Amino acid sequence: MDSTGELVGQARRADIEGGPHRISDATSDQEKTREATLAIASAVVARDGNLAGFSDSELADLVNGFSRWPDQQKTREATVAIAGAVVARDGNLDGFSDDELAHLMNGFSKWPEEEKARKAIVAIAGELGSKGRRFSTFSTPALVRIANGLSRGIEEGEIAGEVAEPALLKDRLHQVAHYLQYAEDRLQQADVRAIAGIFKALGKAQLLDDLGALAQPGLDRLEVLRATPGFELDNNLETMGNLCASLLPLARSPKPVLRWHRRSALNLLNAIQPVVEHKIDAYLNPDQAERTSGANASRCPALSIYQVLKTRAVLETLYRRPYIDGDELALQARQEELHSRSRQILDRARSLLYADLSYMSWNVIAEIETKEPLEALDTFMAQNASMIQAQHAAASFNVHRVLQAMDHEPRPPQGDAGLMRLPVVDMQGRPLASEAELRYSIFHRLTSGAVKVVAVQLKGTPTGAMLTRTFPVDGVPYRMDLFGGSKLKPPQESLSKLASRLPFEAAEAPSGKLLAIPYAETAPRTAFEQLSRAWAPFKEAYYYTQRRGFAAPPSIPDVGPHDYALEGCFKLSLLPDRPAGAVHTFRLEGRSGEIALRPHDGCGFIRASLAERMPAIARARHDAPERLPAYADKRQSAVPPSALHHYPRSVEVAQETREKALAWLDSHQSLTAEDLFRTVTGGHIEGSSAIAVPSSDECLHVPTGKSKTLTRDAGVLVGRSPYDKPNLRPFAADRVRSARDGDRTAAFLDRCVAFQYSFNVAQRSGAELAADDPTFFAKGILIVVPDEIWPVHFAEREVVMSAEDVKCDSRWLRNKDRVKADTALECVGILQATEVFAPGSLVAVPTVEQKMLDGDFDGDAVVIIGGRPRLYEHVCQFDAQVQARGIASMKPPKSHTPAIGNGVYQFSRSKQILSATGLVLETYSCLQRNALAQPLEAQRWFAERAIFGTYEGIHPELKADIRALLQQDRPDGQALHNLITRAEQDSKVARHPVARELAGLLVAELQNWNLELNSEPAHEQSDGMQQLARSMASPGAKPAVSSDAGALFPKLSESYPATADASKRIDFLLNHYQPRIDPRPDGYNPDDLHESAMNLLSVGIKVGTDAYKSDTGARAFMQKTTELQRLLERRPGFKSAPYVKAQAARLLQGRFDVDGSLADLKDNPTLAASVMEASIRLAVEKRILPSALAISTDDHRASRITLSGEQALERARLEAVPAGAHENAITETVHAVAELLRQDGIEVKVPHVGQRSRGQVWIADQLTGKGVSAAPAAQTVTSAVRHVFEIPDEAFTRAFRKAALAFQERDCSEVETTNWFIRMDTPRLRGIHTVFRTAQNYRFEVEFHTPASYRAEFAQSECELVPIPHGAWDILHWGSSGESRSRAAGTSRSLTVSRQQIAVARSPQAGEILAALGTRPVVLVGMPASGKSTVGAQLARELGVEFVDIEKLIAARHGNSEDIFAGLGEAQFRALEAKELAEQLEKGPIVIATGGSCFVQQPNQAMIREKARSIWLDMDPKELRMRLKIGSSRPLLQGCDSEEKLTQILNEREPFYNKADIRVVPPHRKDKKNARICVKELYAFLCSDREAALPAAEISRVSGASGTVPTAQRMHDDHHDGYDCGGGVVETIQAPAAPLREGERQPPLDTLTADPQPLLVGSNARADLASSSRSRERSSRGR
């Protein structure tokens, strides 16, 4: 064994992960080392599990040596054998040293797919951490090996479908990170490899909060190492590749906890690129002698180069403002340089990457080489098809032969034809479900099952980075950018689920699914490509693929997979739609007369004898043994407030609503969460839901089951969501027919069956199906007609469809060419039922009325509202006014984009998918709701401004081209001539007077610029343009704008005339007059701007609704949302509508603000407000409000009891016994820890030694009325023994960390930590409270305080502002695995959650803003009296940070400014100002108010721009003059004419103020209100529309870190029942797929942004989550 031990020891020393910075120093001949290792492995395997002769140390050495050769079968088998021996020890691992355990963990993790290896990892993990070996005993390299092993085990365990094992491993890795947070010296002394290893492990395990907590010390240490002389020599290519990969999450993740560190990570990555480039060049040098050892070595060079290239792709995209500070041109040049060098590296390393990494390298190569990022996969395929197919052959199938075999009478599928299970995988290709449902698939049938399709469960909103990449499924690369469908839409959360959400619970954004296929299938000339040409000849057809090929089965109990499809030859008639009133050729005649139904847009008919060959249809017959329930038969559908907010207020309707709601409440003794919400917000207005089909007359035909609320002498309303416009259609009583009145059509609806269908067929042109016969797809509803009443004229036909039902035809290459005349067809293929509607489900609606509802008849549901005569009359009156105005239906144009260009089929549908998932529908729904909720005067103010940048404005391409010319050093004269011509043509499009004026002004300025460049005129202009140009070009002319334009664009009237240079004036115009939406949307009327603005919001909703099916301009509409929202809220007195889904949780939890909601509704002019007011008052009267409803979230109620006073006292006696027993030992430990801190130079007080024991009375008080464990032995109160540490601010964070480690060294493990400094929901509670557990399993509490937090809490000082000590933000909430969480909301270990909680008590966006600020302060600049001090103080409160006023600070330290000016002069004052500013800028995220001239001084401005984010409070000059009019004491305003001096100062300083990051024009006279505006602007600047354009390459398993999905909490509408989304903060972080072109770059934030994302903020903050009393908070802390 000695020789064996020597060899394995040699192998161990050669291991890079444990040894020095050389790849192999055990022997000069790696091949000999490999052979020796394999020989030892063979010997181990030959022992057949008998390892008794090996010592523990030798076993560890063996595993360490074997792990160097993970691709060898013998080393695998030998390691698995040793793993089995370790598992067999059943946790007895005491014989292994710390380093040996780390080697075992790391070695076993090289084969985590082996069950024994994974079990051994779990066994070792069980011995680590708080309940085993302390991490403090491990060396830093050993901790890195442990972290790597844990992360690999987590990943493989999740792939295997395990739950408990990955949870245990993740908890241990979390404990490693937690230990490193406290043991600051570990990272401060670590090398590059160690930091990269820890970062990679945490990223791969998705422990992003822990990664964020370690990021700053890790980045700081890396910067120190980078600056050392030996950095390049000490770190080889492998280490640099790992470092690049480890920094990727910090560089690009949108998660707030990581985005905090984005700038630092990007700067570091950029700084190390020269070193990386040199190492790659050296490695690829043919003369390189040290490829396996030395500074340029790597064990897997292809992987290292791949990691570098992937990182550079991210760096290239993000190396720009606002992520990086610097000159824009310089940043752009660096981006171009990075791209150029990446191409050079790729060209040299391509063969190496292909050979070693195969498809794993394709993503990054495609991304680097493509010109259009969204088409990266298609581009790469076009260039590398033969290579890809050589590795993964495409499937072979023949659709034509399959269809030929179906040329028979229609019948259900035979055998296992078409049967498939659609597996669901995550975005890494790992299976998510054990076994998918067996179903019939048209796609599977036609392809004979040759193409292996999977469904990918998305995580958040899709991004370009998600879509433009491949991912492996069972080792085969797949792509998911091909198909859309209804599954792409995220599932909708029910009201009940929303209501049950806890106040601090962070909701994960719901996500949809995408279908994916093997990448090789999309190569040219494959069978799948031929199928795609037929199925999707235009790109918009991507939406139908899911319905066409993979439709879900009908929701019928026990339906078989062949019960809902027919295969065969179908005799079809396609009939074009007829105008209303025209006689249709297809007419149904019953025994007693005509049935008023016809085929029309979505609806057709089928013979019963054919349809009932499907068992699913036969089961639904009205005379079937087990009758199926009709659609929505179980309950009535509520009419949402969004259906009412288009109508004006009505006292009569409100009273009617109250009466009906009162009757409903009297009949319901208990309310569900949904009942409560709908009663309070909408008065419980209900109706019957039914599926609309077309009637052939002007009447509404209602089946018996849907006519319960109808009365014979009253009108009926029919509604359809989304309620983007007045979408309630009135039907007078004489137009309503029902079966009970003897109506033949309604009686037929009572008996008939219908079904939604997918029809996929080839059109047979001859006696037999030919290979070139066209194919088409149709969908809609088919009504089953008994054979005896089938029309005689169609006796030879079995199916009749509307021509509109054909959605895709293989011949539609350029446009949709539907049949124009009645056409009989013989079609061979498949008819599949996707949903079945039992008798009584349908209602016949006139085609004209359905069109006015913007609906069709392919399955649209409508709600029928009867029995409400006053509501009916009110809607009738409003509808008459609307019809009198002649407002047409507004729908965005549908696009048709050919998918075949130059004979090449383009597969990618990334652009369509991104447009479809851009939240346009939700965003504009909320915009519309809040706009309509404002008083009419405010609506008009909004409308006057909202049309600019939407309906009116410069053409976006013209703006981009002018901007590009402005940036040229020497503009081309001819290009300028062309721009002038285009600008003049564009000016003719303007229809609003101000728009025409500004368009003419732009033309004149372009002409003036041309005159400045050369004295010759550009060209002949129109008379008006010539006159304006001459006035602009005349000597001494001063440009000006009209008063009307000045009122709408105050910045233009103030600053534009003061700009002397024509090119700068043009730039100014482009910055403040934004491009319109092109093409201009419907609904614009320049004579009625209010109507135009409301139409714009309606069109925005339609754009979002149709974005799944067509390119409706979703991106253009989304770009406008931030400014529209900002504009809406800029008007003083803005109030958001309170009838939102967010109220469901507030109502259920007793947090609904009755008075606040009534105040918000007071000036709301809508019918929805009338109804909600009446409903709230009724709910108060009935005592439904404001008390909370009882709700239990405890899954084990039987194990818990609620203590009475007597029971609490008895339990307190029991609690006091162990407290007394452990008290002295705990106190000794506390004193020992305090003394240790003092020895380290930290002044520590332990002030509460005398009150360390709480006492029985206190314990009983805490327990009375509380739910506790029924087991009396369980310790209930963790603070019965409590100690307090008081520590100075400057040493606080360091002292806490040292103390936590010291307690653990004394066998007191950390159980729970709550950082009350960052829990802003309870502003009076501060400090850090930690629960420890002794070795005897008794828990006690230690509170860590600063002097200020100690006074605030123990002296009950409610007024004192408690500063947050430096570094306290980085101490996370903590709760160890398996411990009970007594503070459910406060024990989350997520820094993200803790920052989200700031939003509850202060601004809803505070947590996001602080995360994005990082260590940067916010600095307010602006004129004297602009409100900087007041706004700053309030802004600091909103953000929960410290506020500093520089002038007051100077006055406190040096005397008031007047004395300094008078005695020492202005220069001395400026020096003091600069000194104090520099000091405050180093304090991290605080708010600083500066003096009026501070930002004007160049050094100050440079400091602020480098280290902070600045906000210019651009107060209206009139308001400034008024504030300063009487006797200003400000030094620079002293003199005889202070007003003239103010104007002069304002003109001088404005160019400097313009350089601030954000400009805010305060709309309120009360400065405190303006702080909220600053919060929103900060959020928009930092968090909303500035998210990264993420490259296509995700962080994959290869790089050792997982990608993250850029998404945050989303608003989500249940648009099926028409309810709007909830109020409060709604955030979207969505990355565009590529860097913005020049014309799309973001202008200053006081104008429309170029690519904004929605920032929708509800102002109903009264019902905030911090409503519980302070005593209850203290009580919960005690528990």
Image (cartoon, helix red, strand yellow):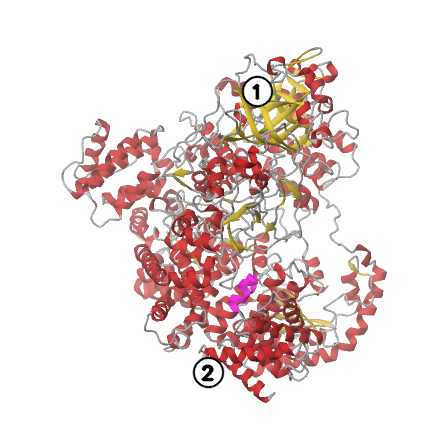
Q: Nearer the viewer, residue 1379 or 282?
A: 282
Q: Distance between the residues labelled 1 and 2?
A: 85 Å
- In the rendered image, residue 736, in percent from the top left (x then y), is placed at 66, 16
Q: Is mark 2 on a helix, strand or loop?
A: loop
Disc 1: CA contacts within 10 A as few (<14), some (14-19) or many (>=20): many
Q: Which residue, given by chain and number where applicable, does mark 1 sit on?
A: 847
Disc 2: CA contacts within 10 A as few (<14), some (14-19) or many (>=20): few
Residue 27, numbered label: 2
Determine if the magenta segment contains residue 206: yes
Quarter of the image with the C terminus is bottom right
Q: What element carries label 1?
A: helix
Do the CB atoms of the residues marked 1 and 2 lie less than 8 Å apart? no
Tell me the chief SS of the magenta region: helix
- In the rendered image, residue 1000, in percent from the top left (x then y), is placed at 28, 33
Using residue 1455 as the reference point, say whether residue 1271 is left or right of it. right
Determine if the magenta segment contains residue 580: no
Q: In this view, does 939 lie above or below 1662?
A: above
Inspect this view and state whether residue 1356 appears: yes
Q: Residue furthest front?
A: 767
